Amino acid sequence: MTEEAAPTSSGPVPVLAVVGRPNVGKSTLVNRILGRREAVVQDIPGVTRDRVSYDAEWNGRAFTVVDTGGWDPDARGLAERIKAQAEIAVGLADAVLFVVDASIGITDADEAVVRVLRKSGKPVVLTANKVDDERAEIEAYGLWNLGLGEPHVVSALHGRGSGDLLDAVLEVLPKAPEAGEKAIGGPRRIAIVGRPNVGKSSLLNKLAGEERSVVDNVAGTTVDPVDEIVDLDGDQWRFIDTAGIRKRVKEASGHEYYAWLRTSTAIERAEVCVLVLDGSQSVAEQDLRILQEVREAGKALVIAFNKWDLVDAERRYFLDREIERDLVQVQWAPRINITAKTGWHIDRLVPALRRSIEGWETRVTTGALNAFLGRIVAEHPHPVRSGKQPRILFGSQVQTAPPTFKLFTTGKLDAGYERFVERRLREEFGFVGTPIEIKVQPREKRKR
């Protein structure tokens, strides 16, 4: 129902919270509204745990959809905190889409949710989901008894009635800027990535000053990416908390597979990725795989060693060796030591982010670049290979974010010499926190 990425609006966009009991089809309905598979869907109650925001558009109007975990008024433990997230979502929303499973009818839990919704004073659009035929449609009208007005019958799975439902949603949402209007600038986008249970959600909660993400000792509590606008050090930042990448994508299944795709999408959306590592544990294969993903996406990078309160002198010795061995390819990334749970040293994150963004967006003039290339070629010419010695004739920076250079040469350069050029570029111009891409274009041989 919208393009692959919804347009960015130029002003405050109204918010629609989607709430309901577990497994009534909220995430499927969110995907239907978005017109693409964004929310993680699986036929297991509780797959969505946090409140998760998505940009949406219908009939030229932009709005934000907030998917929530299943709302059980009698919840305990983790489920109780999921319920709290849903209540926060309602409090922040301009309107509520209340989803009921029409095939089951009204339950005591539904009536309890209605009481909370009435108390909130927010406009409510009642949705009867899983209405796949006329017989089910007749039964759905029993939902009038909830006292929320006419139930809008839909089949989120098949798309039945979704257009009429969105028209009803637009009637209760406040007017927003036209979806085609583009924002200039906007908050920097920061993806928080890492293995499960390294403290990504704890870091987001501490930055936001509230329990924004559900945190539990069970690894993998976050499944969907969670967006949060946070004011830090005089600026707004859009943080994206992501699911931990547990396995190779070929080995993942069900909602894990889609969570992995969402994490990859979050990396693509971000300008800077904060890789959270558990300082008390050895750097793992998954950590290196995520690093590779960030580098291949060309994103700026900050590495945060979390749980520093658990790192003793012996562990620091081995960690230094691991950094030298495993993180040698990203020596350019700023590293900070933090304890997200207590907030210790998280004030160091913003300066590190700013340095990485500055490096990511650095541009070198063509004159300065070629003067630099002339110097290093004179000091350290390319080794002779098979009687030939390639030379760099000319270079230019063809883009920023990430910095990308094109070198025109007399022949193919050794990979080792390209790394030498990159190292010297960093020494000369900085490029802190960003990968550098070097493209070599050998001169074509003249035809006789």
Image: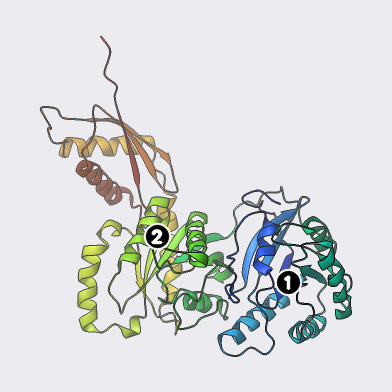
**Within the image, what quadrant is residue 339 found in?**
bottom left
Residue that numbered label 1 is attached to: 93
Q: Residue at x 85, y 69 (%)?
A: 151
Would residue 434 be visible to someone looking at this image?
A: no
Q: Residue lying at the far left in this picture: please name it.
A: 387
* Total residue callouts: 2
Q: Residue lying at the far front in this picture: please name it.
A: 135
Residue that numbered label 2 is attached to: 301
Work out how far the residue at label 1 is from the one at label 2, CA to CA, in angstroms.
33 Å
110 sits left or right of 390 in the view: right
Front-most of residues 5 and 443: 5
In this rendering, the answer to whether 104 lies above or below 109 is above
368 sits left or right of 145 in the view: left
Q: Position of residue 441 (x, y in %)?
A: 32, 30
Query: Tag 1: residue type?
Result: Ala
Q: Position of residue 377 (x, y in %)?
A: 20, 36
Which of pointers 1 and 2 indicates the residue nearer the eye?
1
Label 1 vs 2, first from the N-terminus: 1
Front-most of residues 378 and 161: 161
**Within the image, what quadrant is residue 81 found in?**
bottom right
Label 2: element kind = strand
Report the quarter where the C terminus lies.
Answer: top left
Query: Tag 2: residue type?
Result: Leu
187 sits left or right of 379 in the view: right
Label 1: element kind = loop
Give me the disc on residue 334. none
Mark 2 nearby-residue class (10 Å; few <14, some 14–19, many ≥20):
many
